[in-house]
Image: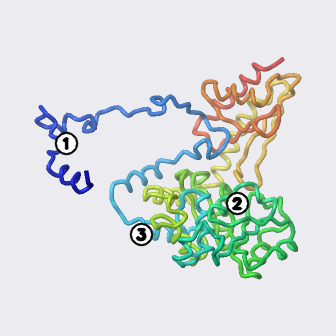
């Protein structure tokens, strides 16, 4: 049956399929009742929920969105609007907040990398847009230079646009590697301490050779100033995750930077048929990301940091008296820059390995996720993902399991 025949048949069918024996079928259907109890779908599906003392990792479903973000997403789901207009208006607001010429919401930071790279390659040429990601045999540039210490996997987002990665260690190696195929210089902020070439010099090299520079700052707020620091510094493109400390939708991110490059990136993105067509971001996520960003920028960050320190102190004071246990407060220098607590124990006094400790916390009640993959006989916890009062549950459970392991 052809589509138009189906539509004609549906048009002649009584409302709700003419349900037999119903004088008012709408009132009789389950979805018409406003008094139905809310479903606990996690329970229905048998899903384990947990207290997140590890961090906003993608594998742990990122962050919990605050009420303001959820309200904005729900409200925006009630009306139709043109997708490009949403991106235009939200992009203007984001760019203003973050000191960028332009911006738009992407399907996460990885998508921002793909689309930013695509925009660099194609510009506003639709012929080139159609060629991606196949660059062989074309006149498009095809190489991106990355410091070897920065090539830890995230650069593969650029590869999805069709380029190959050229790694270098020194400025001399970088300048030697530049040729007619070089499209961009890419910098991974979290690995900055590991590389020989720092931000300002990287930008200077890009300007010297007329090559755009992109920086990935996926999880690098706080501090809040990082939202505009790298735009002010002079990077041409900045990519960030939305579903981490900003507590926006996990499937959202932001690409911001020079106006011409953002326009070219959007030419490769949904709703057009470029390499990013499948990386869709709906109007609810775009609006939600904007509200999350606005909310995050306007927070009292000093007050929030003090709250985190208080939670760390509570857990630390609970655990310190346990024989064989030592603790250390650690603040990662760049990504996930929040107070965390490393908890170590003497294996001669407490028998658990870090993996055993992780499993006891994971499969106990309440279930708690911690960082357990760094060193043997230790775990590390963060508190910036904890809901009010959960630090007490975390302290109590870890304390009990450590005591259970005493030899």
Neighbor class of circle 1 (other Cα within 10 Å; few <14, some 14-19, many 20+) is few
Q: Describe the element under mark 3 as helix, strand or loop.
A: helix
Give percent across and percent down for residue 206: 74, 77
Q: Describe the element under mark 1 as helix, strand or loop.
A: helix
Q: Earlier in the sequence, mark 2 or mark 3?
A: 3
Residue 379 in view: yes
Q: Name the residue under label 3.
A: 85
- Separation of residues labelled 3 and 1 (CA atoms): 35 Å
Q: Which residue is found at the position 21% from the left and 54% from the top? A: 5
Q: Name the residue under label 1.
A: 16
Q: Name the residue under label 2.
A: 155
| Disc 1 to disc 2: CB gap under 8 Å | no
Q: Which residue is found at the position 50% from the left and 48% from the top? A: 66
Query: Which quadrant would the C terminus be assigned to in this image?
Result: top right
Q: Which residue is found at the position 78% from the left and 58% from the top? A: 191
Give percent across and percent down for residue 361: 67, 28
Q: In this view, does 35 lie to the left or right of 255?
A: left
* The one of 318 and 158 positioned closer to us in this rendering: 158
Q: In this view, does 208 lie to the left or right of 172?
A: left
Residue situated furthest top in the rendering: 407
Give percent across and percent down for residue 95: 55, 70
Q: Which of marks 3 and 1 is nearer the N terminus?
A: 1
């Amino acid at each position: 049956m052809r589509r138009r025949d189906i539509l004609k048949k549906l048009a002649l069918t009584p409302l709700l399929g003419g349900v037999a024996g119903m004088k008012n079928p709408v009132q009789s259907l389950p979805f018409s009742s406003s008094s139905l109890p809310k479903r606990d779908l996690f329970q229905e599906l048998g899903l384990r929920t947990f207290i997140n003392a590890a961090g906003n990792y993608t594998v742990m479903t990122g962050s919990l969105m605050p009420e303001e973000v959820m309200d904005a997403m729900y409200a925006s789901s009630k009306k139709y609007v043109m997708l490009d207009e949403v991106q235009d208006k939200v992009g203007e607001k984001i760019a203003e907040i973050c000191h960028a010429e332009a911006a738009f919401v992407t399907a996460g930071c990885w998508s921002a990398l793909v689309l930013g790279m695509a925009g660099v390659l194609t510009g506003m040429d639709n012929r080139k847009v159609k060629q991606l990601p196949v660059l062989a045999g074309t006149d498009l540039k095809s190489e991106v230079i990355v410091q070897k210490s920065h090539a830890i996997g995230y650069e593969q987002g650029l590869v999805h646009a069709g380029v190959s990665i050229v790694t270098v260690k020194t400025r001399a190696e970088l300048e030697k590697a530049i040729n007619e195929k070089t499209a961009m210089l890419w910098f991974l902020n979290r690995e900055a301490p590991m590389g020989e070439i720092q931000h300002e010099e990287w930008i200077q090299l890009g300007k010297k050779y007329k090559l755009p520079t992109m920086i990935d700052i996926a999880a690098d707020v706080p501090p809040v100033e990082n939202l505009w620091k790298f735009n002010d510094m002079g990077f041409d493109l900045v990519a960030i995750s939305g579903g981490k400390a900003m507590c926006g939708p996990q499937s959202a991110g932001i690409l911001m930077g020079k106006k011409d490059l953002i326009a070219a990136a959007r030419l490769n993105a949904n709703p057009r048929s470029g390499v990013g067509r499948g990386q869709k971001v709906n109007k609810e996520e775009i609006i939600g990301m904007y509200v999350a960003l606005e909310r995050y920028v306007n927070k009292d960050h000093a007050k929030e940091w003090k709250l985190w320190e208080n939670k760390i102190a509570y857990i630390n004071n609970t655990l310190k008296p346990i024989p064989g246990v030592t603790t250390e407060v650690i603040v990662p220098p760049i990504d996930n820059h929040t107070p965390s607590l490393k908890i170590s124990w003497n294996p001669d006094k407490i028998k658990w390995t870090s993996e055993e400790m992780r499993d006891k916390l994971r499969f106990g009640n309440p279930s708690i996720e911690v960082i357990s993959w760094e060193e043997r006989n230790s775990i590390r916890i963060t508190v910036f993902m904890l809901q009010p009062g959960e630090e007490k549950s975390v302290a109590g459970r870890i304390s009990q399991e450590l005591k259970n392991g005493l030899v």
